[in-house]
Amino acid sequence: MTLSPLTMPALNGPDPTVAGFTSRGASPAPARSVPNDSRDAQLMKAARALETSFLSEMLGHAGLGAMEGSFGGGAGEEQFSSFLREAQAERIVAKGGIGLAEQIFHSLKERADGAS
């Protein structure tokens, strides 16, 4: 089964930060570590960017975005499929991701606090 943006409901649902609800609508969104100062905000931004890059690569290796059949293929698809994967990875991270950004954030924060 090939996944496309239309068959991925977690990516197409409402924003989980709206009114504190998840895309399923009934359960509260999980608690996240919210950075308090600008340094923490910069560390979280870097952590989320790294998680986005990681997910984009994993989606590519999983074959997401690869078209098969009479309408797929060609040089254009090869060149622009990375943009689709990157956008999908950004959406996944915006919806909470896989928890990698939080782990990276805490590691970066510990390292930054130790250097201070």
Image (cartoon, rainbow, N blue to C red):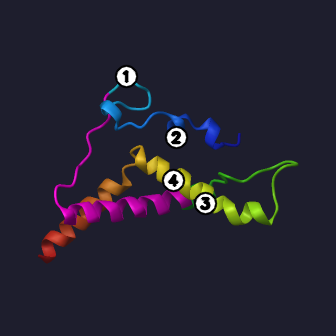
Mark 4 and mark 2: Cα distance apart in space: 9 Å
Instruction: Give whichever of discs 1 and 2 has the lower sequence position.
Output: 2
Q: Contact, CB < 8 Å: mark 1 with mark 3?
A: no
Farthest residue in the left direction?
A: 116
Q: Is residue 59 above or below residue 24?
A: below
Residue 47 is situated, as x and y percent measured from the top left of the image, at 35, 62
Q: Contact, CB < 8 Å: mark 1 with mark 4?
A: no
Q: Residue at x 29, y 60 (%)?
A: 44
Q: Residues within 10 Å of mark 3 (few under 14, many from 20)?
A: few
Q: Is residue 79 magenta?
A: no
Instruction: Give whichever of discs 2 and 3 has the lower sequence position.
Output: 2
Identify the residue under disc 4: 89
| Amino acid type of the residue tagged 4 in the rendering | Ala
Quarter of the image that includes the C terminus: bottom left
Q: Is residue 40 above or below residue 95?
A: below
Identify the residue under disc 1: 26
Q: Residue at x 67, y 52 (%)?
A: 65
Instruction: Give whichever of discs 1 and 3 has the lower sequence position.
Output: 1
Q: Residue at x 82, y 62 (%)?
A: 74
| Amino acid type of the residue tagged 1 in the rendering | Ala
- Along the horizontal axis of the image, is 2 left or right of 10? right
Identify the residue under disc 2: 11
Q: Is residue 31 magenta?
A: yes
